[in-house]
Structure formats: structure tokens, C-alpha cells
Amino acid sequence: MDRGGGAWWQHGIFYQIYPRSFQDSNADGVGDIAGIIERLPYLQALGVDAIWLSPIFPSPMADFGYDISDYTGIDPLFGTSEDFDALMSAAHAAGLKVILDLVPNHTSDRHPWFIEARSSRDNPKRDWYLWRDPKPDGSAPNNWLSEFGGSAWTLDDATGQYYYHAFLAQQPDLNWRNPQVREAIHEVMRFWLRKGVDGFRVDVIWHLIKDAEFRDNPPNPFYREGRPPHEKILTQYSTDQPEVHEVVAGMRRVIDEFDDRVLIGEIYLPFERLVAYYGNDLRGAQMPFNFALLSTLWSARSVEKIIADYEAALPKGAWPNWVLGNHDRPRVASRVGAAQARVAAMLLLTLRGTPTLYYGDEIGMHQVAIAPDQVRDPFEKNVPGIGVGRDGCRTPMQWDATPYAGFSAAKPWLPLADDFRHENVVNLDADAQSILHLYKALIQLKKQLPQLQSGDYVPVAAEGDLLLYRRASDGGAATIVLNLGAEPLSIESDAAGLAGEILLSTLMDRNGERIGDRLDLRADEGVIIGAPAGQAE
Ligand code: GLC
């Protein structure tokens, strides 16, 4: 059965850029839009189809751009509106779509809307945010906790009420029950869509609506010491409320006012709740991000279970997607190890659905240890010492072996990885067997083989370190055999139904090898098997 996948965002490969860390063009140690333009040829050569930019809008940078003070401007740190327009034209001319980060759950506390709202209890914008009276003893209205530590409520002394913030006190939550808020953000979306942006990744979309009565959240019976403090309570009343789906459908209607755009949602929820974000009749987000690979145990059984559970949970016609890294989670090369990072790449690019790559993962960038005096992330500053810091996955892209890795002519805002002199784009490009070339080869193969694009996912085996599955379509099957361990593996070809030739090995040295009676995989090796080039099965 062919399951389609005709839209650009279904056959495209997405690449997340964290603009602060991609390329600096003006020697201030922070990446910018002109820098991204310079690097478009690299992205074209890599073969990706769409770039998603973390926020580039004016911001006091309390949460590095996720605290927006003007939704339709560009922060001078990143450039000007003209720079943005130039990026749009250059990206589109290079065949790359551009996705922006929409942060509608909260604004900066310096956003004019919040400045007005907090100015008095009867200000017309008061109800654009979430205000509550203190309890009789003066304490916060309920027990909700900020994801970045402490209470989620901050008292505004001047007006005597608390406002709610799921994240920092500098990030007050908007009131999405207020129709004016919905309309204002819809207008923001239209502003960028008219400029030609191809869609949005919507920040914390499952947070948008809170319980109308602001009931206390229940305690989390599974809380473990050493985990972030906000996990002590569940988010039963503060996130994922039934009414959120109307809000998502409203955003989708705006997306659909324009041709061929995409709505992607950031959502950390179990599959059965995640898939509700596709919406009734699939009129919600086209791609609610599937983050399951970010936290899985790296074993064949666990990974296979995730794939099977996700495939089973998907509503009919819903298009899947997979993510291996982002700016909030430790890098894949550190989660699974450098050798397995290649296997993870093969997994990401052979599963059914749209893959999103995180900048630098294609060169195997690892988590960088950040000294206490170099910490920038507010989460780490508020909740130090238990490993929540996100700076380590946001370090500058490693382009070459020059003093600042070709990222900047000045000292970067975050330290560079200590191995950047070897592990950089220039060096890896010169090595035909590097992880960079593996990524390129995987991307090309995904584009060439219809079964990798639209074939069904067929599980075959998940035992010990062996993960084996097929992608089958009318035109034939590709078989993916992954060794998730550091010991060699040997499989009987007949029993596993292996025939054809190796189209690609993660070690990049046995393409074209015919499959005999046995398939021997080396430590940390994965292969894709299919019909020989130019021959249908
Ligand atoms: C999202 C972003 C994260 C940010 C948070 C608050 O989870 O990915 O970086 O800190 O929202 O906006």
C-alpha cells in the first residue's frame, strides 16, 4: 500500500537552526540572519528542504528569544527586517522553505501588551494575561509551578494581583480564552505568512489553554529526587486542556488562508494525547512534533516499541514525524555515543514520516560541558547542579579549524566544543566516510527510494541489539538492519528475508555488497538493503 506523502512538508527534510549559534557575520560572537544567508549553500549541499529558525524577534533575551517583546520585528542582534527579507528570497531561490518559531503562549514582560495589562486592573489589556487575587494569606492563587523553578505566579505589587507564567516571571502567559488575544496572534501569523514564510513551529502549543477554574494540580507520585522541581506536581489543570484543540484549529485556519503552509506543534505528551493535536478530521497541526526518540532508552526493543506505539496511535491519514535533537535536550551524540549517532541518523532518515535534524548533529556535535561561570541558560541558573542546563546543546556550529571554528571572528557567546579543530565541516567534508557524508547519503537515498518516502513501516525483529524493519511500497521494499550495540552481529539471510544488496552502510564502505547466506554487521553498524541500483525488486 502506498500511503502518499505528496505535500512538500511530507517529503521534505527539516533542519533546525538555533540562530545565535549558527553563523555570526558581524563579529559580535552571536549568530545572525546574514550568517544564515552565507551558509545556505551548505544546507543545499546537505540536501535538506526546510529550515526552522528559533526566535529572531525583538526580545530582552531572558530566555534567549522565547520572551518576545515585538512579534513582527527582528531583534537587532540578528539583523534587520531587510536582512530577513533577503533571507526569504535567498532561501526560496535555493529551494529551501523557511519556518519561523511562533511563541504564542507567553510574551516578554516588556511587551507593550503586558506593560499595558499590568498598568491597572481596569486596563483593556488586563484580561490578555492571567491575573488572580492572592489567597487570603497573601500566597499564590494555586500550586502551579514554573517549568524553570519556583512558583508559576508572580505578585504584581502595584495592582495587588498575581500573574501566571509557565516559564520565567519575564514570560507572562497570554490568556487564550480571550478572543482578542487569538485575533492578535492570528494577525502576527498573517504578517509573516504574507512575507512568504512557509509555516510555523508553535512553541509549547499544548500549554495554550489552562483550567478555567485554576484548580490545584495533583502531586506526581512518580517524582524522583534529582529531577527538576516542577515535576513534583502533574500538569493536569495547567496544560493539555480539551479546549486547546479549538485554538489549534483556529491557527490552522489561518495557515489554510495561504497556499501550502505548515503548522508544526511543540508537544511533549504521551502518544495517545499527542496525536489529538492532529485535530478533528486532521484540521489541527499537520505535524505535532514526535519527541519520543529524545528520551528513549537506546535498545532495540525500546526503540521498536516506540515506533510501533506511535504508528498504532496515529489517526487515519495523519502524517508521522521524527526528531532526534533540539535546542532543549542533550545532543544525540552524547545520549547514545558517537558511534551510535550514525545508527541513530540511519534510523531517523528511514522511519516513516518527516525527519527534523538539529544543526550540528550532522557533524556529530556532542554536548559541551559548561563551566558554572559560563552558564547562560536561565533554567540552569534557577535550578543549578542537576543537569537541566541547555547551553551544552546550543554551542556554536563547528565550520572549520580557525580560532572560533569559522563561526565568528570574535569570542562566541557560548564556548566551542574542545574537539572543533578536528570535528568540523571542512574536515568532515574531506573525509568520504564521515558522519557528514553519511547524512548526505541518507538524505539522497530517502529522496531516491519511494519506499523510504511513502512505504509502510513493517517491523521484523527487535532482539538484543538487532533492530530490523522494512519500508514496503508497491514498488518494492527497503530493509533496514541496525546494530544498536558495540558487538558484531550476524543474521541468517533466509530467516530474516534479506535479499538484494547493501545500498548504504553507516560506515560508508560496503555499498553494493551482495547479500549472501549471512549478513554480518560490525559493532555500531547499520545497513539499508534493497534491490541493486536501477533494478526493481
Ligand atoms: C519551548 C522552547 C524552550 C523555551 C520554552 C519557553 O519549550 O523550546 O527553549 O525555553 O518553550 O518558551
Image: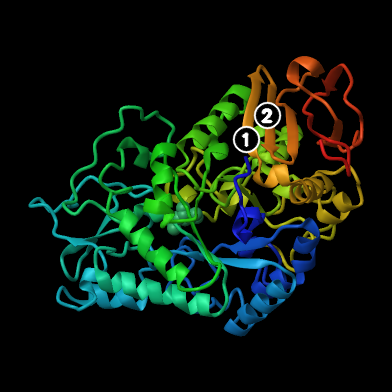
Identified at 36% across, 65% down, the residue is 250
Q: Earlier in the sequence, mark 2 or mark 1?
A: 1
- Res. 279 visible in picture: no
Q: Is residue 117 left or right of residue 303?
A: left
Badge 1 marks a residue whose secondary structure is strand
Residue at numbered disc 2? 469
Q: Nearer the viewer, residue 358 or 3?
A: 3
What percent of the width, then of the height, locates residue 336? Answer: 66, 33
Residue at numbered disc 1? 457
Badge 2 marks a residue whose secondary structure is strand
Q: Which mark is residue 247?
A: none
Q: Is residue 387 left or right of residue 463?
A: left
Amino acid, disc 1: Tyr
Which quarter of the rendering shows the N terminus?
top right
Amino acid, disc 2: Tyr
Question: In the figure, 311 relative to 62: above or below?
Answer: above
Q: For mark 2, does the 10 Å Cα neighbourhood hold few (<14), some (14 to 19), or many (20 or more) residues?
A: many
What percent of the width, then of the height, locates residue 276? Answer: 39, 46
Which quarter of the rendering shows the C terminus?
top right
Q: How many marks?
A: 2
Q: Is mark 2 within 8 Å of ligand 1?
A: no
Q: Nearer the viewer, residue 99 or 386?
A: 99
The answer to whether the residue labelled 2 contacts the one labelled 1, judged by CB atoms less than 8 Å apart, is: yes
**Gap in angstroms between the C-alphas marked 2 and 1:** 7 Å
What percent of the width, then of the height, locates residue 21? Answer: 65, 61
Q: For mark 1, does the 10 Å Cα neighbourhood hold few (<14), some (14 to 19), or many (20 or more) residues?
A: many
